[in-house]
Image (tube, rainbow, N blue to C red):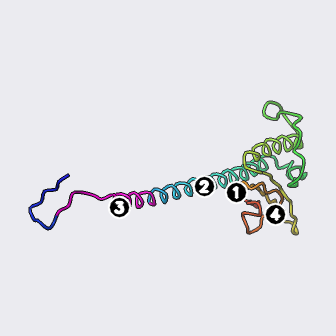
Amino acid sequence: MSCKSDQPHKKQCGFTLLEVLIALLILSIGLLGLASLQTNGLRSNQMASMRTTATQLAYNIADRMHANPAGVDAQNYVIAVSGVDPVIATDCESTTCTSLQMATYDLAQWRSAIRSLPGGSSSITRTVTGTVVTHTITVFWDEYRKGISGTDCGADPFVDLRCMSLTL
């Protein structure tokens, strides 16, 4: 192949193989960085979705408790993390229920929805300080899907469950 040039000492026929390889290396590093950025973005989006779901579920049971004050006063909504899911005896959407039946129905529906979170569990505790009664609704889940189980909301997300608490 012959190269033509106006100046006899400046001949350039095109890219050399080395220049092509360097360009491909730079392009591949950029694409790897872009893939990493996409992966981190998807992971963050999934975590945000789990947190949103946990928040919505906590407010869901809070609304159900506000609708059944007699059941709240009778402590029918107090449940432990490792508690057994309530058995639904009556469908309270189609029939009239007592406050206990309504609380049992609400908790069964809520705990069923909690299972949509990975490793999802929940608790509702009641605290009495003088004349003030507060309820703490806590939703637990395994954010990194590491098979973590338990009731601890520690600082290390790779060892402890992620938690969202709402106090009423």
Q: How far is disc 2 from disc 4 in space, using C-alphas?
A: 23 Å
Secondary structure at badge 4 equals: loop
Asked if disc 3 and disc 2 are in contact, CB closer than 8 Å, the reply is no
**What type is the residue that disc 4 sits on?**
Asp
In front: label 3 or label 1:
3
- 118 displayed left or right of 8: right
Q: Residues within 10 Å of mark 2 (few under 14, many from 20)?
A: few
Q: Residue at x 89, y 35 (%)?
A: 89
Observer-nearest of 47 and 3: 3
The quarter of the displayed image where residue 145 is located: bottom right
Is 26 magenta? The answer is yes
Q: How far is disc 1 from disc 2 in space, using C-alphas?
A: 9 Å
Observer-nearest of 102 and 48: 48
User: Which mark is drawn over residue 144?
Assistant: 1
Q: Which residue is mark 4?
A: 152
Q: Which residue is mark 2?
A: 43
Span highlighted in magenta in the image: 11-29
Q: Which residue is mark 3?
A: 18
Asked if disc 1 and disc 2 are in contact, CB closer than 8 Å, the reply is no
Secondary structure at badge 3 equals: helix
Q: How far is disc 3 from disc 2 in space, using C-alphas?
A: 38 Å
Q: Residue at x 44, y 57 (%)?
A: 28
**What type is the residue that disc 1 sits on?**
Tyr
